[in-house]
Image (spheres, grey):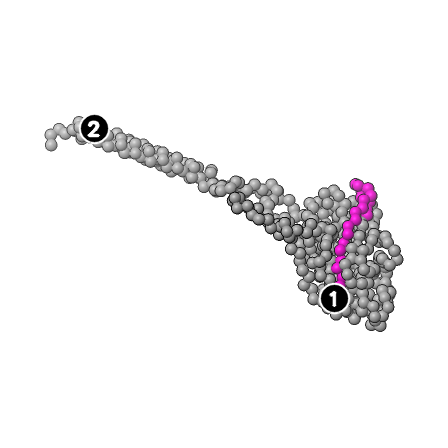
Amino acid sequence: MGNAVRPSRGPRVAVVASTAALIAAGFLIAPATWAADAPSAPAASSTPSAPSVHAAPGATEAPVASERTVIDVGHVDAISPRMVSGTFRTLLLDDRNALAPVWRTPGSVILHLTQAGAVSISDDTPGFFFLGDPGTTVWTIPQTQDPTVIWAGWSTQSFTSDNVRGDMKLTLEDVDGPGDVVLWEWSPFGEPDMVIDGRAGLPASYTVPTFTHQHANWAFTKPGVYRLKFTWSADLVDGGPVSDSAVYTFAVGDVDTSTITLPGDGPTPDPTTTSPTPDHTTTSPTPSTTGTPRPSNSTASSPPRTSPTGPAGSGDGGTDASPSPAPTSVLAPTGEPASGETPQNAGPGALASTGSSAVLPLAATGAALTAVGAGAVVATRRRHRRRA
């Protein structure tokens, strides 16, 4: 074979070793980069607590709804004052669902005392003679709950002696309706103890302590639509004397509530202008206004009650001796992120971070180094072959 010179392995081994070291370094760096670039767990945010149903001054306020609503059964604190954005307001607390009570504007609600509340005064109902002669029919809301009719009361539980001086005052200012309105409680002896008697003249007032939840008997002497103007008055520790009035709408008897106009209703749409001819040159025509549908009354008429609940001996009647704390579980507005939370992927079409921004350059660098190393090996082999 002669004195052929064997190519040295030194340069080739060095090049291969260097290339392998660089590739290994790239794969060692990549996981660390992935870990650094991966999305971290969201930090704990200071989400505000659920709004208090009674929203005492300084607490997170529960919202006030204003959509048209008809209530014909269940519990409502119909005439209840509350502070709203620093203003003393007379509102309606709809707590038919005790776990999700809703504050409402009185001008958006119809309180429907259906035919189920009719009472025929007779010898079987001697306690009701103060409302009319035998044979007379009146419509009543009992002081203790009757599940077939609304159970309307009032509440001052949004206020305490810490923010109101003395008692609060509830006043029936005016009644616009076909008959009279009377509110009373039953005495321990079964006699009517008047709260407000509209027959004796108006305005008529009733004193209510702070942080009180109370019910009484209601009577309407004729069927039809009534507008009752109530006013709450108080002497705020931080605001002095305040008062606010609201008109409450009662539908009494077999009344079609869909025909009743409320103060909170918007203007009735004109059918000749609610469906304009669309412009065919416009690519995105504006939909026509159709108006807000009104709920219909589905309560079936019931015969008058001949044996109504007499003087209350139990239940929720009268001022609570031990006022219960305000409910803590209420519906919070939905549809918006809680204050203090930032969406992980803000902006339309944003993608979650995966760490690919670092992997691609490292992979490209590794491939380039591999190619350089392989080229160096081939060049070394050729050089030594020419020497041989």
Q: Which mark is residue 257?
A: none
Q: CA distance from mark 2 to mark 1?
A: 110 Å
Residue stretch in magenta: 233-253
Position of 230 relative to 315 (above/below): above
Is residue 108 part of the magenta span, yes or no?
no
Residue pushed farthest bottom? 123
User: Which residue corresponds to the image point at 68% horizontal and 61% vertical from the top-left?
Assistant: 297
Q: In terms of sequence position, does the residue under pointer 2 or pointer 1 come before the other?
A: 1
Q: Position of residue 125 (x, y in %)?
A: 83, 70
User: Which residue corresponds to the image point at 85% horizontal and 70% vertical from the top-left?
Assistant: 134
> Which of the pair 16/128 is nearer the observer?
128
Q: Quadrant of residue 71?
A: bottom right
Q: Quadrant of residue 385?
A: top left
Residue highlighted by disc 1: 116
Residue highlighted by disc 2: 383
> Which of the pair 35/177 is nearer the observer?
177
- Per the picture, the main secondary structure of the magenta-coloured stretch is strand
Let me know if residue 211 appears in the view: no
Which-is-in-front pick, marks 2 and 1? 1
Q: Position of residue 136 (x, y in %)?
A: 83, 68
